[in-house]
Image (cartoon, rainbow, N blue to C red):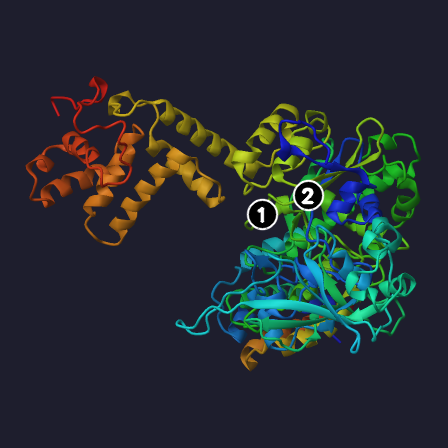
Amino acid sequence: MRKASHRPAIALEKMIKMIGDPMSPKSKEHIEKELQELNITKPADKGLYYALQTVNELIRANKIPANQEVVPEWHEIDSQIAYYFFTQKAIHLEKVEQELSVVKQQFQSSPEESLALVQLEKNIQECRKLK
Amino acid sequence: MKNLASSDSTAEYLAGEQALQAAGIPPSFAEAASLTLNPGEFVVLRCSAKPAAYNQKANPKTGLYLSKSSGHGAVAAFFPLDPDLTRLQNNVPIGHHKKDRLKIEQGQQKSIELKVTLLDLLRRTEANGDLEIHAYDAASGLLSFRYKNGCGPKKNCRLQSNDPELNISVEYAINLKEAKDLAIHYSRPWDKPENLLVAKTVPNELKNHFNLAQFQELLEKGYILNYAKHIEEKPSPFKPVLVFADYAIQKKGSSSVELLPVTGDVDELLVGYPAKLPRYAGQVFQTFDADGLPDTLGKVRLLRATKQYFEEIKETYLKGNSGLLDHPYLNSIDASIYLKKIFQGTFEELFSPHDNQSANFALERAGRITPHEFLYNIITNQVYSQYPDVNIHNLYQHGADNRSPYNPSPLDAPSLTLRRNLLKGELETIYCPSLHSLLKNVLLDPTYLKNCCFHINPRWPMDKFMPVIEKQLKFQAQSIFPETYHVYLNYRKVLDFEKWTSQQPTYQEPSKFNSSFKDILPCLEVLKNYNQNIPFRTKELLQAYELLLNSKQEGHLYPNKAIQGAIRVFKKHSQPLPDELARSNTSLALKLPEPPILQRSSPSLLWHSFKDPSLPFFEKESYNEKSEPPPSHRPRKDD
């Protein structure tokens, strides 16, 4: 198994390429600034933050329709992950995994768009394993 | 009602238990919500509709529901699935918010049959209630209630444009022969049967069927609430009322899941804070952005600042009693009992979103909030959950209204102020039925203004809140929110302009102007962005100016009447013509073939237009066709 420190962060550009160009994504510089403020340095955590923000921006650009509206669960997922970044305890990610499976069904996204959510799920699993 | 100023009936207020009763707030919640206040500090709560049934378990409305709770009849403070039972505006139901409607249509909204007691319904038949008993059918056991005259939903709708309007009347009923299990907890002492007049007399409709003892036995039993919608007075069958429902907070280790009706939460209008609050604890953070999307960074910032604030208080608290009086959270007489446990623990224990057992003030629903307010809400919810008679937890669901970035809810609604007496530290409750009363009795009270800071939402009407800001500038300059101060300064400039225009005689020559409409245009832009009322004369000028701009944008030549009307307004308020008007004046002159007088230069044209009584803004008294204008108003010869 690769060491956590050697695991590369998932770049925003890569994700955007993978899921289609959202209309108004946060710039990489913007996200890097936020990561700096949050003091997120571990690649796995960075990847999780990128994935979270990418899904957020896809919703904003209506690339993920989410039943025409953003589902409440998405807000809760974001809160749980924010709390994870606050406490750095992976226990808070357990619930996120459960909620994300619900959200994936409710988002009714196309296979291409749901890749962003799958990617987010992978990042969550990765962060949990490493804790 | 108590009366502070006998000449001013609109400034009336209620105090003590009367205030709580009028607001419908449980005394235990008022106690919990005031526990952390220092003497001289206050919190103002908004009063929603008194719940039709509040002595049973329920979930408070969270920010996830965007519809308004119903405010009438047997469904008050609940969220009925039937749009005809939703909140009324001029007796017409407003329906659900589109997001909630979508959830209902897609079958995603959980719902439950609403259970009520006979006492719940009889309470609504009191003098200030909106229901009356309609009939009792002894054979079926059906006791029906209808709205009093002028109350309740009355929908006038046309199915096709040529159809007549249809009136819908609603009736409620319970079946006294079909009692259900219902656990009742009285969180409001005045609401117990022994304190209610309606519980002491058998209603006329039931007199032939029940004696007093039998009647009183029925009072606290649960019944499924039914309703019928009669269209054009044609009877329709009764069916159960379905209301929004959510799963209750699960106890740790418990596998049972309880679906409970959703009822109104308690909204804060503002949360006061001490002047010596650390700067970071008064900083505003947001947990979702302007698009309504989660703000991850904002949440982490808020959690970090709140934890720092919590740790700071904890350190002071654990040092012992000495010096505690200086701290905002530790000055309450009763504080030690409830707060000791909280401050012996960690911030994570107090606020733990992964652990549903604890009273949780959800991060995602907080909205715009300061660490001080965030902690205040979490602690209040936590303390309130420890009271034995509580059937609704987590009554605080989001940040206060004074932080809302959206259009504010109507302010001229009743409010309840929870205040610690400045001298004795006792809890004072003040029910104000109107904004005027709140301003006069609470927000403008100089004694308390010196001791308690609070922010004013920049979208609140500046014409009402300007005196408060001016007093804050005098006593607590640091408590003024920069955005609010910006709006205040612009409003004051507009007010000065308004005053100046009102003092000017008409027909002032442009060279004599001290203040110009053009100068205050940027101020008006600010006020419009914050939905502020613009004073009368300035508004007239603005409308004239906008009329002109709009006709220009549409690509038409300025219509004659629009120009003349606009010119008239500017002249009336002694304002030089804006560039657009001055230019249009020339083009108009070229465009119009007759009469010859219109082809003359602008002041004559203006004077001519003033004499036309068919045009708007004509002032008959000032401008008599037969008389000459006063010398000061006479057009200059060289023009």
Of mark 2 and mark 1, the one earlier in the sequence is 1
Quarter occupied by residue B168? bottom right
Q: What percent of the width, then of the height, locates residue A40?
A: 69, 57
Q: What percent of the width, then of the height, locates residue A57?
A: 55, 64
Residue B82 lies left or right of residue A92; in this view the side is left
Quadrant holding the N terminus of chain B: top right
Residue named by callout 1 = B410
Looking at the rendered structure, whether the residues under marks 2 and 1 are on a common chain is answered as yes
Residue named by callout 2 = B415
As shown in the figure, which amino acid type bears the numbered disc 1? Pro
Which residue is more in the foreground, B254 or B182?
B182
Q: Residue at x 70, y 31 (%)?
A: B3
Q: In the rendered view, would you say B203 is above or below A128?
A: above
Chain under disc 1 = B
Which residue is more in the foreground, B33 or B356?
B33
Quadrant holding the C terminus of chain B: top left
Q: Residues within 10 Å of mark 2 (few under 14, many from 20)?
A: many
Q: What percent of the width, then of the height, locates residue B309?
A: 77, 42
As shown in the figure, which amino acid type bears the numbered disc 2? Ser
Q: In the rendered view, would you say B21 is above or below B600?
A: below
Q: Residue at x 84, y 69 (%)?
A: B209
